[in-house]
Image (tube, helix red, strand yellow):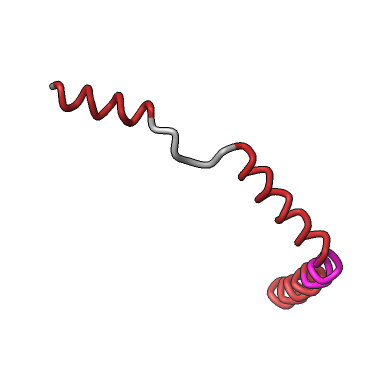
Amino acid sequence: MKKLGHALRSFWNEEDGLGTLEIILIIAVVIIIALLFKDWIVELVERLMGKADDEADKIFS
């Protein structure tokens, strides 16, 4: 029983993990990458949606 209590206490007091700063930096990098490749991403999505629309027309025609 003491081992379980000690394990729970050590787990609760553990301070490893992601901090707020790391999460903010990751989000900032993702936003910067998205802005850099925005035109390419929009073009890709439009092409994919066009293909999906064409395939849907074939199926329902």
Q: Is the C terminus in the top left, top right, bottom left or bottom right quadrant?
A: bottom right
Q: Nearer the viewer, residue 49 or 18?
A: 18
Image quarter for residue 10?
top left
In the picture, measured across the screen, residue 7 lies left or right of residue 27, that is left
x and y percentages locating residue 6 in the rendered image: 23, 25
Q: Main secondary structure of the magenta part?
A: helix
Task: Judge whether 2 appears above or below 27 on screen.
Answer: above
Q: Residue at x 44, y 33 (%)?
A: 15
x and y percentages locating residue 27 in the rendered image: 69, 48
Task: Judge whether 1 appears above or below 59 on screen.
Answer: above
Image quarter for residue 38?
bottom right
x and y percentages locating residue 8 in the rendered image: 28, 26
Instruction: Answer whether residue 58 is magenta in the image.
Output: no
Q: Residue at x 82, y 69 (%)?
A: 46
In the picture, measured across the screen, residue 59 lies left or right of residue 6, that is right
Q: Residue at x 79, y 67 (%)?
A: 41
Q: Residue at x 68, y 74 (%)?
A: 59
In the picture, measured across the screen, residue 15 lies left or right of residue 18, that is left
Instruction: Answer whether residue 38 is magenta in the image.
Output: yes
Task: Judge whether 27 appears above or below 54 on screen.
Answer: above
x and y percentages locating residue 31 in the rendered image: 76, 54
What stretch of residues is rendered in magenta? 37-44
**Residue at the extreme right:** 39
Q: Nearer the viewer, residue 60 or 30?
A: 30
Total of numbered circles in the picture?
0
